[in-house]
Image: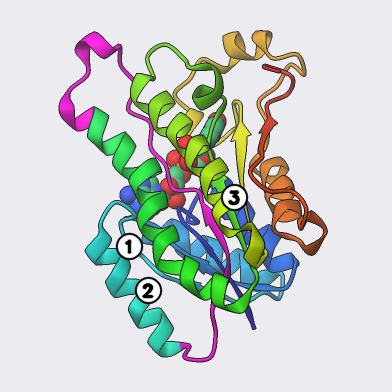
Amino acid sequence: MKYALVTGGSRGIGRAVCLQLSKMGYAVIINYARNESAALVTKQMTENQNGVAELLPFDVSSPAAIEEALEQWQNNHPNDYIEVLVNNAGVRQDTMLIFMQDEQWHNVLDTSLNGFFYVTRRLLKNMLTHRYGRIINIVSLSGIKGLPGQVNYSAAKAALIGATKALAQEVAPRKVTVNAVAPGFIATDMTKDLDEVTLKKMIPTGRFGEPEEVADLVGFLASDQAAYITGEVISINGGLYT
Ligand code: NAP
């Protein structure tokens, strides 16, 4: 069995990525923070397409929780390793910087940025030893151009872009690639409170993207064919920003 871990696999983009990686032959490990019922739906959807899936809940911002969960997974799978890691878990807590509370700053950075660090560090050794791995970080248009009201989120995603480029160079000799995918507006729970009618007038394609469209790109970056792509940030935003 080949294994892929998707953080935040219970809903939205993460769910679509689980389904795509499963179609590519991966047994998917569905991580989530709280929403077990949504994670179970992802698992069921994976099994409905004849895939293999298991749940692995942990908070990506908690090094102790990550260590415990991944240690247990490894003990249950002594001869296996996780060869694809999609760092997808993320949260938005938007407000103008002048009003931003410490908690809003830390929650957003802890999830997107520190989550990447803790989970990736834990899984990287096995990828390097096996001389094969794929790490895909879900960043954002916000981390490329910055968006007002999202100083915390833009900072987290921009930092993750820097980390992607640096790590890609560290691990390329061992055939581990590290890339970032930067979506614009994608129709998920994260964007359901936004004014879609107004926002889509700004998007050249005139619509929000679908999670499956992001998942197709992630699937390509996870494939053998993408072996020579590393350290890249690939936008998927309907032409909103180039
Ligand atoms: P979503 O529908 O809100 O789903 C968020 C996922 O992240 C859920 O599975 C959630 O788990 C998980 N999660 C949140 N905090 C976590 C934590 N501390 N530990 C583990 N899992 C955690 O979001 P989405 O729109 O699919 O976004 C996925 C990624 O794409 C995020 O990194 C986001 O920043 C990025 N992105 C999204 C858009 C967009 O327009 N939607 C655009 C650009 C970038 P629970 O179900 O347990 O809460």
Q: Quadrant of the C terminus?
A: top right
**Is the residue 228 above or below the residue 30 in the image?**
above
Residue found at x 71% / y 76% = 50
Of marks 3 and 1, which one's residue comes earlier in the chain?
A: 1
Q: Amino acid at mark 1?
A: Phe
57 versus 181 height, above or below: below
Q: Is mark 2 within 8 Å of ligand 1?
A: no
Say which residue label 3 marks.
Answer: 169
Residue 81: in magenta span = yes
- The magenta stretch is 77-104
Residue 207 image position (x, y, % from top left): 70, 21
- Circle 1 sits in a helix, a strand or a loop, which is it? loop
* Badge number at residue 58: 1
- Residue position marked by numbered label 2 in the rendering: 70
The answer to whether the residue labelled 2 contacts the one labelled 1, judged by CB atoms less than 8 Å apart, is yes
* Three-letter code, disc 3: Gln
Give how far across and how far down residue 10 sits, in percent. Answer: 47, 56
**Residue depicted at 47% across the width and 91% down the height:** 78
Which residue is nearer to you in this view: 30 or 222? Answer: 222
